[in-house]
Amino acid sequence: AEGLSAEKLQSVIESAYDRYKDLDEGANADYIPILATVPSDLFGIVITTKEGEVFTVGDVDYQFSIQSVAKPFTAALVMQEHGPEKVQEDIGVEPTGLPFNSKLALEVHEERSVNPMVNAGAIAVVSMVPAENEDERWEKIMDNLEAFAGDDLTVLEEVYQSEYENCWSNRAIANLLFNYGRLYCEPEEALRVYTRECSVGVSALDLGMMGATLANGGTNPATQEEVLDADHVPELLALMAIAGFYDESGEWMYTAGIPAKTGVGGGIVAVVPGEMSIAAFSPRVNASGNSVKAMKAIRYIAGELGVGVFGAN
Ligand code: GLN
């Protein structure tokens, strides 16, 4: 980034860390029971430049479940396979303004009322991955997440079990989508594969590299693999900008000014297009399911660096 020295990047993440490390607002999500057992005080921040340079502070190696931070990356896979128009037609690109697990959003407009950043759209995304069977569907999704991370990833099996045993709300969503002809494989298959992608273990460092791949026009800076065509990156970042924080997405863009995606495991990755990613992890989430500390830290960093996409906030 022009004018942003290594010293500046390291010092800004350290000040963000110091500023928010003692904050204990929010609570671990517990509707997926195992998430309540993750140590709540964990906190890590990473900046990864589009050249692949990495700056870290705090608990950046701890493995947590990716949860909804997987959503943009699997949407990228579907864009890559079918083109962005297909995502717009078959899923939708409007913000719902509703919680991530909303069923109401599906009932508002039967044609296109959701987007790939909320559960309904993300379950539909999984069903659109071209595959002969469930194993192939899963392998394509996992390979794609690994390509973005530039590293091998594993499923946290206890997280998968804990969520799959309690996923009645997502099952309702999958069934509603299927009822409306907006799910493109069997509902239970889509539900299992979606739950599995949410259970993939990542560290803040992994999220940083995944975001840096988007900041670098879809090419992983560490492996040089072209994971997403550069001309699809703007559409993907637009989805993150309009819906990355569900019913807080407007507030996020208004106050932080950069596209980002959160997960109820406490991870957030933000992208400064053509420059860098800012990733953070901390398990305590607010009522919308967004990590309180990660959100505040990234907003502070974006503000200090003056990297808002519409101008410095
Ligand atoms: N796996 C979670 C769910 O479907 C993901 C939600 C989230 O991270 N906001 O409920």
Image (cartoon, rainbow, N blue to C red):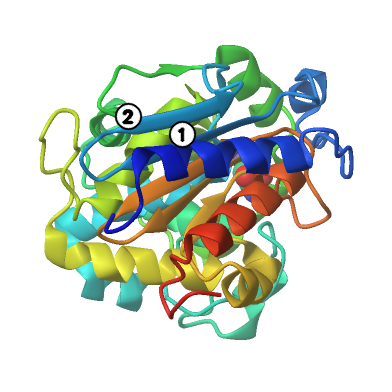
Question: Is 131 located above or below residue 165 in the figure?
Answer: below
Say whether residue 36 is left or right of residue 18: right
Residue toward you, 174 or 122: 122
* Residue lying at 59% horizontally and 51% vertically, measured from the top left: 298
Q: Measuring from the top left, give residue 120's x and y in whole percent.
A: 55, 59
Q: Quadrant of ligand 1?
A: top right
- Report, in whole angstroms, how far the alpha carbon at label 2 lies from the one at label 1: 7 Å
| Residue 147 falls left or right of residue 225 | right
The one of 256 and 190 positioned closer to us in this rendering: 256
In the rendered image, residue 25, in percent from the top left (x then y), is placed at 89, 44
Give the residue drawn at x 53%, y 39%: 11
Q: Is residue 293 above or below residue 106?
A: above
Name the residue tied to disc 2: 142
Query: Where's the N terminus, which quadrant?
Result: bottom left
The residue beneath circle 1 is 197
**Mark 2 is on which residue type?**
Met
Mark 2: secondary structure: helix
On the question of residue 128 being in view, the answer is no
Toward which corner of the image does residue 75 lie, by quadrant? bottom left
Q: Residues within 10 Å of mark 2 (few under 14, many from 20)?
A: many
| Residue in the picture at 36% in, 39% down | 6
Q: In what quadrant of the picture does the C terminus appear?
A: bottom right
Q: Is residue 167 visible?
A: yes
Amino acid type at circle 1 is Glu
Q: Does the residue at mark 2 contact the one at mark 1 (Cβ under 8 Å)?
A: yes
Q: Is mark 1 within 8 Å of ligand 1?
A: no
- Mark 1 residue element: helix
Q: Is residue 137 left or right of residue 10?
A: left
Q: Earlier in the sequence, mark 2 or mark 1?
A: 2
